[in-house]
Amino acid sequence: MSLNPAGTATAQQKSAVNGDGKPSSQNLTPTKKPRTPKPQNAITIAVSSRALFHMEAEQRIYEQKGVEEYLRYQVEHETVPFGPGPAFAFVKALEAVNAQLRELYPNSEELFDVVLVTNNHADTGVRLINTVNHHNLFIERFCLTGGNSPIGYLKAYHTNLYLSADPEKVQEALEEGIAAATMFCPEKVRDVSETQLRVAFDGDAVLFSDESEQIYKEHGLDKFFEHEKAYENKPLDHGPLKGFLEALGKLQKKFYARGQRLDCPIRTYLVTARSAASSGARALKTLRSWGLETDEALFLAGAPKGPILEKIRPHIFFDDQMFHVEGATEMGTVAAHVPYGVAQKHRQRQPVDKKD
């Protein structure tokens, strides 16, 4: 299967404009929006424009005709909103959680805050603003870097997670110590919950370090099982997405404090190729040692993850191996590749020159 970052447009994505390319009749003027939390208090999700919106036609113009034609096209079409991209449903779910948090804690700024981060030029910002307002998204912080990499700004925005369609920028963010992943979109996206945020994580090289995966890659499955049994009570080191799970857990506890553990609007899943009896205990004990947990843990013992994810229907699934990312998207799940650890050793990185 050939898989491109950000995927292709779905019927839902294409419906944002009429068939003649004109914007739909929805008013682009925003409704009243809630106050934006201070960055130091929020859980900040930085999302690139091509991860949040469907911009493949514009990307082709940039690649085939150059930056000047690209900029001209964007200005000429600035009243035509972009359709939803792979991160769109995830961002809408974040906003649904925020709405419930504001009801329970009106004065709290412990909320999700989404920042649109892009290397587009500032003049294209009008179309992005119109699109945000068209979809009634609560995104007030923008970072448009005019062709330069935006990664250097992520720490200034207090970023907890960066999502992009550009694998090179994701790698750059990870090297800066920022949780990051490359978004991939199925051709046909499964419906997901509009009231509960669902996030699924792989274990090794995502939540945990790749130390155990190195044993498996270098010495095989039997040695891996021996190693995990011997070190069952030694916590694994943290992986790149541990901090994001921690942030989700912090917000979950705010709902638990109001008696909403069983119907919490945030639900997390560990979906791992590990076997439960042979190597599962160390994963669970590591989470416990961190003071963290996932709502569900699914140990697949090497079985494909796609069918399980189809049942979970997460808004996003994080994995370090493209094999599992492709399997997820084939079953209709929006997946995000975390290019971290030993599984990337034999993957060749190709230079990417894209507007993101």
Image (cartoon, rainbow, N blue to C red):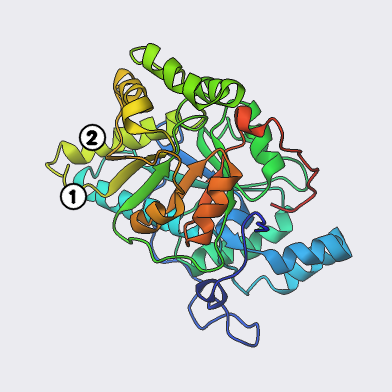
Residue at (49%, 33%) from the top-left corner? Answer: 206
Q: Is residue 353 visible?
A: yes
Relative height, residue 129 to residue 94 (above, below): below
Q: Which residue is mark 2?
A: 253
Which residue is most to the left? 259
Measured as percent of width and height from the top left, residue 102 is found at: 26, 48
Q: As shown in the figure, which amino acid type bears the numbered disc 2?
A: Lys
Let me know if residue 231 appears in the view: no
User: Looking at the image, is mark 1 or mark 2 nearer the viewer?
Assistant: 1
Residue 170 lies, in percent from the top left, at 64, 39
Q: Is residue 342 left or right of residue 280?
A: right
Does dot 1 land on a helix, a strand or a loop?
loop
Rendered location of residue 131, percent (x, y): 56, 66
Residue 263 numbered tag: 1
Query: Which residue occupies the foreground of this view, 340 or 195?
Result: 340
Give percent across and percent down for residue 335: 51, 51
Is 45 on the left-hand or right-hand side of 54?
Answer: left
Q: What residue appears at the point 57 percent right and 53 percent down from the top-left corner?
A: 326
Mark 1 neighbour density, 10 Å: few (under 14) some (14–19) many (20 or more):
few
**Mark 1 → mark 2, Cα distance in angstroms:** 12 Å
In the rendered view, would you say 334 is above or below 173? below
Labels 1 and 2: the sequence-earlier one: 2
Amino acid at pointer 1: Asp
